[in-house]
Image (cartoon, helix red, strand yellow):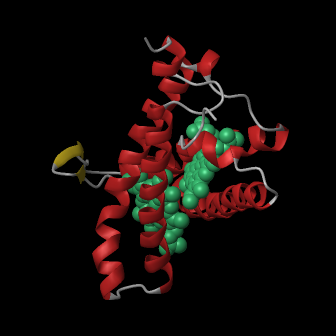
Amino acid sequence: MKEISEVTDRPQGYDSISRGLHWLMALMFAWIYCSAIAHNLLSDSALDKFLWPYHKPVGLLLLVLLVLRAGWNLLKRHNRPPSMNLAASIGHGTLYGLMFLIPLIGLLRQYGSGRAFSAFGLQVMDGFEGEKVQWMINMGSNFHSLLGWTMLVLIAGHIGAVILHYRQGSSQVLRRMTGINSRS
Ligand code: HEM
Ligand code: HEM
């Protein structure tokens, strides 16, 4: 019979739900950054027109997945692999903070603008008549893109750190998140 730790979690690697959420969200971040880059550099191009309509819905979905991921991490807090080092803890913590703040600020600006917002066919915000909520709009205008690009730099650093570990002969870090040979 399999040990409980083998079925539910493995201290030397992330459990399958954590891994699934990490890679699913990484794919969605790739999509959202493609949409942001096309919007910035190729405004009004066919690519921008194709990708941009999904920016807000995918951003909202990323926030929902982040809340699920944080809840799962909390449930599994005694059964997660230890951090590789202090830099990894700080880097991952900062990524979590930004993954929360960026879509939240985007949604606040959306609400403050008074415009209706629907995602994947669901009405998320009804919109309202009258005065816009200026502080929400200002916060969005000042910080959403700024933090968004900052996180892209951090993601590049995160991927760079994984590659560095790998090239230095330690494939353990990648195995913790892919699950491949994680018990060997
Ligand atoms: C984690 C999720 C998200 C990331 C990483 C992200 C990232 C970005 C980035 C990097 C830009 C700059 C694009 C440019 O310079 O043209 C941007 C623009 C924008 N985002 Fe997001 N975004 C996210 C979620 C959202 C959400 C949930 C909303 C609204 C519901 C939203 C609304 C907007 C809008 C309206 C703009 C264009 C306006 C502007 O340039 O300030 N985003 N986003
Ligand atoms: C090609 C893209 C990516 C690769 C190869 C990659 C690889 C990895 C690896 C190997 C780990 C395990 C590190 C360890 O155990 O210390 C990890 C953890 C982590 N990654 Fe990534 N990653 C990628 C994209 C992303 C993106 C886009 C984000 C978020 C914006 C992200 C956020 C995290 C976080 C927060 C952790 C800590 C573990 C957790 O709580 O899920 N990663 N990543």
Please identify the quadrant where the C terminus is shown: top right
- Pinpoint residue 87: horizontal percent, then vertical percent: 82, 44
Residue 52 picture quarter: bottom left
Residue nearest the observer in this picture, 25 or 45: 25
Q: Is residue 127 left or right of residue 148?
A: left
User: Exactly how many numbered labels are in the figure?
Assistant: 0
- Pinpoint residue 9: horizontal percent, then vertical percent: 53, 22
Residue nearest the observer in this picture, 81 or 127: 81
Q: Residue at x 62, y 40 (%)?
A: 176
- Pinpoint residue 27: horizontal percent, then vertical percent: 44, 57
Q: Is residue 41 left or right of residue 156?
A: left
Residue 115 picture quarter: bottom left
Q: Is residue 96 visible?
A: no
Q: Is residue 123 left or right of residue 53?
A: left
Q: Residue at x 50, y 44 (%)?
A: 22
Residue nearest the observer in this picture, 26 or 170: 170
- Pinpoint residue 161: horizontal percent, then vertical percent: 75, 56
Q: Is residue 138 visible?
A: yes
- Where 67 falls versus 6 (above or below)? below
Q: Is residue 124 left or right of residue 100?
A: left
Please identify the quadrant where the N terminus is shown: top left
